[in-house]
Amino acid sequence: MQIIEVRDILEAEVLCCDEILTNEVNNAFSSDLMSDVLAFVNGKTLLLTGLVNCQVIRTAEMADLNVIVFVRGKSPDKNVIEMAKQGNIILLTTRDTLYTASGKLYSKGLKGINI
Amino acid sequence: MSAIKYTFQIEKDDFSRAGEASSSIKKILMQVGSEPSLTRRVAIATYEAEMNIVIHSDGGTISVMIDPKCVMVLAKDNGPGIENIELAMKEGYSTATDRIREMGFGAGMGLSNMKKCSDEFSIESKIGEGTTIMMNMCVKEGE
């Protein structure tokens, strides 16, 4: 699924890197536990999370993830967004909860990963 | 390419900079053209080690020795040491505080994640002295 579709499905706001919204993701993973992200997630996976600190960006960088959706209307501060920009990591924010956002994407065909 | 060595200083409780050493290591590996799957394993393992040093220790260092096929990581801290290594290795076991958990860490997956990423893994710890973790990761056949 293209990130631009994710944006439309979740009526999300793009916080960073809107020039690469045509990039694709194959799966999604929803978690607030960064060690679980590091343990289970591979590249081309979308991360949905309620955490907005700089460790989320670091986690994405280490695990080769290139898009993060912040749920429940959360938005990180400027230096976190700047860090994502440097790593070409797309950031979106939606007013949906983690459950609702995950359900909307799943119902449109974006499946979870196998662990 | 002959083996190259880098050492990074990791400060206790410095959460704003936590991950910078791992980020630098990943960039170095990408620059020297390391195989992507190996690069990813090293990045994840060093990041978990770095977070552990920031969260649990009195500070320490992470060293990497890079040669064309393998990367060795040495994470060494200055204490306080782990009382029960077997328990610490258990998935889900953690002594992290609520503050750490609110940052998305302290789920008790760090050491097992490091082991999972490594081809060789060893951990030694002495109360009052510190903990040393050695990880060796090599390109797998077919990569």
Image (cartoon, coloured by chain):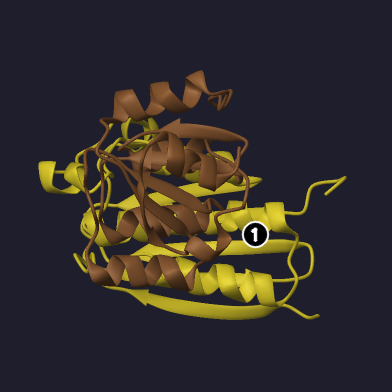
Chain colours: A brown, B yellow
- Which residue is painted at 38% across and 36% down in the image? A10
10 Å crowding of disc 1: few (<14), some (14-19), many (20+): many
Q: Viewer-proximal residue, A26 or B48?
A: A26
- Which residue is painted at 43% across and 77% down in the image? B8
The answer to whether any part of residue B141 appears in the image is yes
From the top left corner, tell me how far across and down residue B2 is, in percent.
78, 80
Disc 1 is attached to a residue of which chain?
A: B
Does residue A14 sit above or below B82 in this rendering? below
- Which residue is painted at 54% across and 71% down in the image? B25
From the top left corner, tell me how far across and down residue A8 is, in percent.
44, 40
Position of A43 with respect to B14 (left or right) is: right
Q: Residue furthest left?
A: B98
The answer to whether any part of residue B62 appears in the image is no
Position of A111 with respect to A56 (left or right) is: right
Q: Viewer-proximal residue, B53 or B101?
A: B101
Q: Quadrant of the N terminus of chain B?
A: bottom right
Does residue B124 sit above or below A20 in this rendering? above
The residue carrying mark 1 is B39
Element under disc 1 = helix
Q: Quadrant of residue B66?
A: bottom right
For badge 1, the amino acid type reads: Thr
Q: Viewer-proximal residue, A49 or B125?
A: A49
